[in-house]
């Protein structure tokens, strides 16, 4: 993270593009939050599979 003249933090930006030219600009903090949200969704969706595997033992 870099600082400006006013000592305010300036978040670094992450840019993602695809073949069609769609662009997504996220700050590092927003990208980190999004990754945690997507990780949580994947865990919740895979939870029934894990529960069924232990029930069959």
Image (spheres, rainbow, N blue to C red):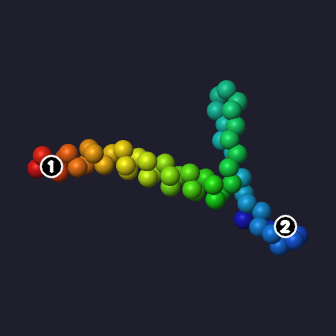
Q: Secondary structure at mark 1?
A: helix
Q: Residue at x 67, y 37 (%)?
A: 17
Say how many tags the image has: 2
Residue drawn 69% across and 54% down? 27
Q: Position of residue 15 (x, y in %)?
A: 69, 45
Instruction: Identify which residue, 12 or 54, lies in the foreground.
Output: 54
Neighbour tally class for label 1: few under 14, some 14-19, many 20 plus, Cα within 10 Å: few
Task: Pick the quarter of the image with the N terminus.
Answer: bottom right
Answer whether labels 2 and 1 touch (C-beta < 8 Å): no
Number of residues whose C-alpha sits closer than 10 Å to that of mark 2, classed few (under 14), some (14–19) or many (20 or more): few
In this rendering, the label closer to the viewer, 2 or 1? 1
Question: Left or right: 6 with respect to 36?
Answer: right
Q: Residue at x 11, y 50 (%)?
A: 57
Q: Which mark is residue 4?
A: 2
Left or right of 42? Residue 9 is right
Q: CA distance from mark 2 to mark 1?
A: 57 Å
* SS at circle 2: loop
Front residue (pair 22, 40):
40
Which of the labelled discs sits on residue 55, or is there none? 1
Q: Looking at the picture, does residue 23 appear above or below residue 47?
A: above
Task: Decide which of tag 2 and tag 1 comes sooner along the chain.
Answer: 2
The foreground one among 13 and 44 is: 44
> Residue 52's x, y, as percent?
20, 45
In the depicted structure, whether residue 45 falls above or below residue 29: above
Q: Quadrant of residue 28?
A: bottom right
Residue 7 on image: x %, y %: 83, 73
Question: In the displayed structure, would residue 3 be above or below residue 28?
Answer: below
> Residue drawn 56% across and 51% down?
34
Residue at the farthest top position:
20
């Amino acid at each position: 993270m870099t600082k400006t003249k006013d000592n305010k933090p300036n978040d670094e930006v992450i840019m993602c593009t695809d073949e069609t030219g769609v662009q997504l600009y996220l700050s590092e903090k927003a990208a980190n939050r999004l990754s945690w949200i997507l990780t949580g969704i994947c865990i919740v969706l895979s939870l029934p599979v894990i529960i069924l595997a232990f029930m069959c033992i």
